[in-house]
């Protein structure tokens, strides 16, 4: 993901989420040195993902596939890319939050070996209040 991608990434984010990140959040992720990946075909951004790594742990901050490109395996492709990058950095464990209502995402994460370790009350903005988050984790095999 480059600064030139931000307008398009933000547009995908707005189409996919009721409470989207703004363009500045994506810019800040790039500036912070997070792993920011776009999935592109024919010059069009199909999806993106963002991973922060620190102290042997990684946190998936965002993983999104544009609505018209879902169910083609692109989300799994993006997730595989993040996990590969985490392994290269010798990450021992990967964490993420997901809405309990996001069954497609939870299904993908569980397929890849993630398991729920906690629930964060009132984590996400929602209509009429807040929604909890499921906290998932994946232990990665260490090298050597």
Image (spheres, grey):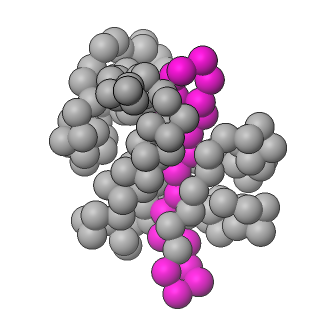
Image coordinates of residue 24 in percent, x first then y, are: 78, 47
User: Split into 4 quadrants, where in the image is the N terminus?
Assistant: bottom right
Q: Quadrant of residue 135?
A: top left
Whether residue 21 is in magenta: the answer is: no
In the figure, 72 relative to 115: above or below? below
Say which residue appears at 30% left-offset and 44% top-offset.
105
Say which residue appears at 73% left-offset and 52% top-offset.
23
Say which residue appears at 24% left-offset and 40% top-offset.
112
Majority secondary structure in the magenta region? strand
Check the image and name the residue furthest to the bottom: 42
Q: Quadrant of residue 87?
A: top left
Pick the front one: 21 or 94? 94
Residue 117 shown left or right of residue 89 in the figure? left
Pick the front one: 60 or 13? 60
Image coordinates of residue 60 in percent, x first then y, are: 49, 36
User: Split into 4 quadrants, where in the image is the C terminus?
Assistant: top left
Can the viewer see residue 51? Answer: yes
**Residues in magenta, as a range:** 41-63
In the figure, 141 relative to 14: above or below? above
Image coordinates of residue 5 in percent, x first then y, are: 70, 67
Check the image and name the residue furthest to the front: 144
């Amino acid at each position: 993901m480059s600064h030139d991608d931000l307008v398009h990434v933000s547009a995908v984010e707005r189409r996919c989420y009721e409470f989207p990140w703004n363009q500045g959040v994506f810019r800040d992720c790039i500036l912070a040195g997070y792993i920011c990946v776009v999935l592109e075909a024919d010059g069009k951004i199909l999806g993106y993902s963002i991973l922060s790594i620190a102290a042997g742990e990684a946190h998936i901050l965002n993983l999104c596939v544009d609505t018209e490109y879902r169910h083609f395996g692109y989300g799994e492709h993006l997730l595989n890319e993040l996990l590969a990058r985490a392994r290269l950095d010798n990450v021992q464990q990967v964490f993420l939050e997901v809405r309990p209502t996001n069954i497609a995402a939870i299904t993908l994460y569980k397929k890849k070996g993630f398991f729920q370790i906690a629930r964060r009350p009132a984590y996400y903005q929602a209509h009429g209040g807040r929604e909890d988050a499921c906290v998932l984790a994946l232990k990665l095999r260490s090298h050597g």
